[in-house]
Structure formats: structure tokens, C-alpha cells
Amino acid sequence: MHAEGHLAAHFAELRHRAGDARPLPQALLDALRSLLGERLVTTRPVREHHGTDISSYPVTPPDAVVFPHRADEVVAVVETCARHGVPMIPFGIGTSVEGHVLATSGGVCIDLSQMNRIVEVNASDLDVRVEPGVTRKQLNAYLHDTGLFFPIDPGADATLGGMASTRASGTNAVRYGTMRENVLGATVVLADGRVIKAGGRARKSAAGYDLTRLFVGAEGTLGIIVELTLRLYPIPEGMSAAVCAFPTVTAAVDSIIEAIQCGIPVARCELLDTLTVSAVNRYSKLSLTEAPTLWYEFHGTARGVEEQATQMQEIARARGGLDFAWATKPEERSRLWQARHDAYFACLQLRKGSRMIATDVCVPISRLAECIADTQADIAQATMPIPLFGHVGDGNFHLMILVDPDREDDLEEAWALNTRLVRRALAMGGTCTGEHGIGLGKREFLVEEFGAGVDVMRQIKATLDPANLLNPGKVV
Amino acid sequence: MHAEGHLAAHFAELRHRAGDARPLPQALLDALRSLLGERLVTTRPVREHHGTDISSYPVTPPDAVVFPHRADEVVAVVETCARHGVPMIPFGIGTSVEGHVLATSGGVCIDLSQMNRIVEVNASDLDVRVEPGVTRKQLNAYLHDTGLFFPIDPGADATLGGMASTRASGTNAVRYGTMRENVLGATVVLADGRVIKAGGRARKSAAGYDLTRLFVGAEGTLGIIVELTLRLYPIPEGMSAAVCAFPTVTAAVDSIIEAIQCGIPVARCELLDTLTVSAVNRYSKLSLTEAPTLWYEFHGTARGVEEQATQMQEIARARGGLDFAWATKPEERSRLWQARHDAYFACLQLRKGSRMIATDVCVPISRLAECIADTQADIAQATMPIPLFGHVGDGNFHLMILVDPDREDDLEEAWALNTRLVRRALAMGGTCTGEHGIGLGKREFLVEEFGAGVDVMRQIKATLDPANLLNPGKVV
């Protein structure tokens, strides 16, 4: 569907789909109504909201939206939809970036945002049980007085269920891992309404197949997560943040490669290219040096943080890094990192009315400088602004290709650029997506990356969801 | 098969099986002979060696053993066996503890120990590609001059393929995670001879279902791992080790709970009970205080190690811990840890001619002291010596129940004790196996732990191995 040159056609098809009238069976609607009352909604605005994420894809609404409050209601919805052969799309808060929630085959959107209870904090075990609609900021606010925090931070205030389903990571992953490492267990409703528990609260287990990791990253195509057990961490005694500008992107990246190889346990390490820094300056009213810049955060004991920062500064200086601008007080740190988190909105201002097509490759860190340099040569040829930033400590970076989604040429150009980038990353031993997931947009790249492995994924999908009702058309 | 009261019958059945004559089809033997020549072996000693692990189960030999040298030979063996409907049992070096390699349905053992090349060290990416027969000591010896190491250390010098297949962990897991966190990718031969690549070299990926984690811990029942990509770590600048004796097991465990909650990044933290320490003293000719004792190791910068150790010492003192006995020079550290690693052999000496039945529960750390105390009450009633030790930083501990495998009473008593222990751990939110795996011995406990989740595991098994030829009778 997404072969080079066909993205515009795909957009047109999604737009067409959005206009379709696909009435759901009355018996299904009656059953859902009697189950959920007002929590079944079929109004156009609500449906359109649920057919939208932050990608550039056209709105592709579901035919109805339900808002369950409990796992047993999810089971009842799933059983009802399964009986009628109607697709189901689990929905968190709509911050995914690969069209994950688009109702490309219509059906019922299961909005889990009202299942947002924090069930149990086990402070002494450093874990927490949450419903899937809890957002990461909600969780961290709730944890405020416990001395603990949940580190995974993809930027958006996503739901934890959505973050698990897309195997999200973000700025802290270089130190704390991704959702893959931080989901200890999950309760999942399968396509036929069965409820299973995967994983548990033990820190490690060799008990059977790792179903937890199978559902994490499955993008709602294998089951619907109705509860998660997550790892928590003690808030470090010492935290400090800094920015440092470099003469070139290569110099900045090389300094990070060296730091990772030295084993400096940096907690966050983000690169913004010059275009992104200038966008951030304008949007967040800052006066950062407009040059390729690294954002750092160090966590540890007071002395440990000092030690890490000293080492990092020495490495940066040797690569031509300018002086570190420090932020140690919490409000200074927040301000500095808010600017980084605002990069997305700041960059959108670079082209009025634009939407983004985000790329998301991740490569072995030894190839990162080369991958970025080759990509910058592509960017130099582009007709639209393309800021570059990313989680370089993991080898993961994004282009934010700013397109006018109504211009076919833009879509084709963006797609060609992304295709070249993905192939470059795969040739370097990398992956087509570090943290955004496959969704609609990267299904062909998944096949390029794994070949026959995708057949195995399809076998698993067919076994657990033989009627292909759970988020159909995504991933495989 | 393993219900309470039936372990002795199960042993008898395995013994009976060992005596069976189950001639393989001549056409199969001819095909394997023409493929592998002398690397097909059917002599009794070789078959018996491959029907043995370090559990107390009776020897249960396969009907033939093959020694492939390359992945394409594994494919040819698998295709040949599949054509004849003959079971296949992947074999590393035979150090598993739950009967994983026993040929309970006969068939061909695929010994991968001669596929032991270290394919590629990527020092700058902190990863390595290895064949499955490489052992952890072989890998670390090879890495000696690179400044890197592979941390997972289950005690035995197991093969990395076997460690991946059983999701092994061991003494370093509290800091570095288990094989689950340290396998980046795998090449796997499926039951029908297809070869797939799972994962890759990127540090993180959101590309499709997590097949890597599906094969890690599958105990050879879903596919045969023919290559692994593993994470490596820089050897820390500072390393120090210490032992500290405590007045009670509870005091020792409480100190660890506190340290974990404070976020002290201890690299290793092992508990030995009094009986184990006295066995170690005798076996390794040491003069440790015969009391519940913690073994610690700290990794980090020189200052960081000092800081961690100081904090840990303060916590230990507050719980009545005696003075730390330190080892900072490499040879002193090795000697200290060798004593810990020798605990298995030391304990076997506690009862002449005995074999062990090892328990392996893992619980949330807040319940660990209670779980151990309740278990010690059980041990006090037992008729045989039962040393207790384990990886308490993870909430994981072992009993080494020393049985005479020819005495039915011993087997029944051990089984009853293990069953009580597993149920105690499950009631506390723990798991029936922290690191040994399910194998033959814990299949019923897997069902107690996961219920309907095991049906999903069985569905996956049936999809990927419909004829049930890969290590049949294990896990599910």
C-alpha cells in the first residue's frame, strides 16, 4: 500500500474511507447501549477525534466510540464486537504518530482513557499497578510524595497503555530502558474475550514464554491491555542538566559515542540540530546558541552526578563543545527540558499550517554520525524545512518533515526521503522504528527489516485473532 | 504428571523410558550420516551424556546425537527430522536444572557446543555476535583485552544459547538484568526449517512483535537459536567485593531490601545461610564466620564504588551486620566469589551420594524476608540437609534439597516442600521460577501461576511447531 510513489494515493483512500457510511449492526449498537448507556457515542465530532493521531494522515473515524470503566466492560465490548465480526481499535489519548488508531476498516473504538485508576503503589518493591488510561504525568504527580518516579518520557503526556502498546521510550531510555524493560506484567483481554495475566511483580522470572513482551509493542493487534504493572525508580539524590553547543552535528554525536563507550551512565542525552534550536528559541523565548546542541541530564548521588558531568564535559571539550550551561535547581531543569519537549510544537511553526511526517530510525551508535551526515545531505536537497533531533544516546533520531498534507508532491518527497533513510539505517544494522512503532506507515519497512520473521508475526496474529478484528491493518 | 505424591512415579517412568529401544528410521539415520558423517553419534555413553543435566532426574537419553558446525547444517537436520516426525532436543552443555534436555520422547539431540565461534565483537557498540555454543567464560576470556565484559553469570559455565533459552540470570542480574534484557537479537531455525532473524543491533526498536523475547526463555520448544547478538558492558573502573555476616537471615534480607529501596546500584548481592557458609568453609578451606552472610560486589567509578560501599555498610551495621571483609584486588575478589560459586559443589558434600532438587522461587522484595522465614520453618522439619542461598537483591533464592534419588520418601518429601514453597511465593505475587525455567519439573506450577495464559503459550507452540517436535514435553 505504501510503496514509493503511492503515499498520495494512500492518503486519498483514507480520505475516501472517512466519508463512507458504514452503519454498524443495530443489534450491536443495542447491546453496547444496554451495556454502557451514554458511554457509547456515535456523534461525528467524537468519532473524528478518535480517528486522529498526531501524524499527517487524514482523519479516519471509527463508526462508534465506547468508554469502558472496568476490565469486565472491556470483555463485554470485545465479546459483543467479536460476535458481530466488527473491528475494535483500542485508544489511549491519541498521541501516536504512525496512524495506529485510524479506523481504516471502521468498527468500534475502545477509548480506555476513563480507566485511569492507579490501583496500587508498592513503594517498597518499586512497582505500581495502573489501569491503561493513566497518563505518565498523572502517575508521576501521584507518586510525588513517595520519592519514586516512572522514567519513561516520550514527550507527549501519553497514556501508559498506549505507551506499552507502542513500546514507547523517549529521552530517558538511554539510562532506564524503554517500555520493554519497564513493564513487569499486564492483564490483557484477548480477541475472543479471554482475560490473561502475563508477567507479574517478581523482578525476574523464567516461567514460560514471555507473553508480557509479546503484548508490549503489539499496538493493540493481539489483545487489549486493561492493567499494567510497571517498574518505578527512586528519585535520584542528585540531578543536574546542561546544554552544550557544538561546531557540527558530527562533533556532538562523536562526543556521545565516546561517552557511551566509556560507560558514563547519562540519564538523558538529546541532540537538536541548528534549525531545531532556532525554532525552540523562537517558540520558547530562549537565547540558546544556534548550533547543533546536546541536552544532558545526569542522575545519581550528589558526587556521582558531579563525576559524570566532569567526564562528559571533558569529552565535549575535546570535540570542540562550548561551555556547559548548567541547570541544577528543579525549576531550571524543568525550564531547560520544557524547551526540548516543545521542539515538536516549535518546529511545526517553521511552516505555517504544516503537519509532520516523523522519521524514527535507530542505528548502532558507531554508525550514528555517518547516518546523520548522509541524511543531512538529503535534507539539504529538500524543498521543505526538516528539523532533526533525537535520542542520540540510543542511536535514535527523528526528522520532522513538515508537509502540507494537501500537496501530493510534498507527500511523495517526504516518503522518498523516509524510504532512503530507513534503507540507510537497515544497511547499517539499524531498525526502521526506534520508538514510534509500525502502525499504518511502516508495514512495508517491517518486511524489509525482518523478511520471514514477519510471517511468524502473522502466524501469531492469526492464532490469537483469527477473525482479524483487533486493530486490523496495523503492524502486519 | 507431577501432582503431589507422584514424583517417585515420574522418576520410575523416566527410568523405564531410558531402557526403551526406540530405533530411529534407517532413512533418517542415513540422511543424517550423509550430512554429518562422524558427527552423528549413537553410542550409549554419548547418548546418556546428552540425556543428563544437573537435576536429580534419571538419565533419559536421546536415540542419536548430532554435532552441527553451521546454521545450514542445523536447518538440514531439522528438515530431516521434521520429515520423519522425529523429536529434536537442542543441547548446549547440559548444565540446566529442570530436566530441559531429557529426551522424554526420544529423538535426536542437536548438540550445539561445536558451533562456538565468536562471530563479531563490535566494541564501539558494546555488542557481540556469537554462535550458541560459546560459553560465558569463553566469551569473557575472548573479550579480555577489549575492556568489555558480558555480565550474566549463572554460576555454571553454560553456553550462551542455553542461557538464552532458559532466560538465565544469576549473581549479576540485580545490576545488569537477565538474558531477557541482554539478548539484542537472535537467528532462529524454526520447526519447519525456516530461518528467521529476530531483533537486531539497534539498542531499541518498536518494529513489530518482540520475537527476540519470545525465543529467549522458550527452552528450545519454539525454535533453535543458531546465533545471538548480546549486549556488552565496559569493565567498570572500580570494583570491590565484600562479605558481611548477620545475626539472622531476616536481618541480612532486611538490609538488602533497604539498599534496593535506596537505589544503591549494587552489582551483586548474594545470601548464604549458615549451613551453606559452613559447607563452603569446608569445601573451599575458608574460615568465614558461620552465620547468615551476604556477598556483595560494587561496580562503578572508583569514587562511586566507595560511596556505594559506605552506604551499604551503614545499612548493614544498623541491622547488626558485623564488619565488612573487603576484597579489592582482582585475585582476592575472584577467590571470594569462587567460594560463592562453589556453594553448589560444597553443599552436595553435605550428604554423600546425594543429588539436588533445586527450588527457584522469586518474590517481590518486600515479601522476601517473610518468604524465607516461613520456608526456614519448613526446613527445620525436613529429614535431609537443605542449604538456602540466592540472589536476594532480585527476591530470588534457592533451596538445595539433597535427596537420595533412589529413596521414594526423599522425592516425595522434597516435592511436597517445593510445592508448599511455590504456592507461598505465588500467594506473595512471586513466580515459580526466577531463573531455572520450567523444563519438565514445573509445568504444573506454570499452570498455577498463569492459568489461561498457558493456553496462549500452547496456542503459540501449536502454531510454530504443529507436530510438537521441538523439545516436546517441556514448558507447556
Image (spheres, coloured by chain):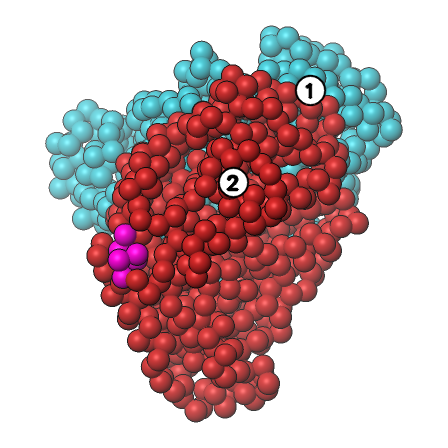
Chain colours: A red, B cyan
Which disc, if any, is residue B305? 1
Q: What stretch is highlighted in magenta?
A: A408-413
Q: Where is residue A170 in the image (x, y as percent from the top left)?
A: 53, 45
Identify the residue at image location x=69%, y=34%. A327
The amino acid type, in three-letter code, at marker 1 is Val
Examine the image and state in which quarter residue B92 appears. Answer: top left
Check the image and report above or below for A460 versus B292.
below
Residue picked out by circle 2: A277
**Who is closer to the viewer here, B187 or A230?**
A230
Residue B228 in sight in this render: no
Residue A84 in sight in this render: yes
Identify the residue at image location x=67%, y=49%. A127
Q: What element carries label 2?
A: helix
Q: Read off the chain for label 1.
A: B
Q: What element carries label 1?
A: helix
Q: Where is residue A273 in the image (x, y as percent from the top left)?
A: 46, 37
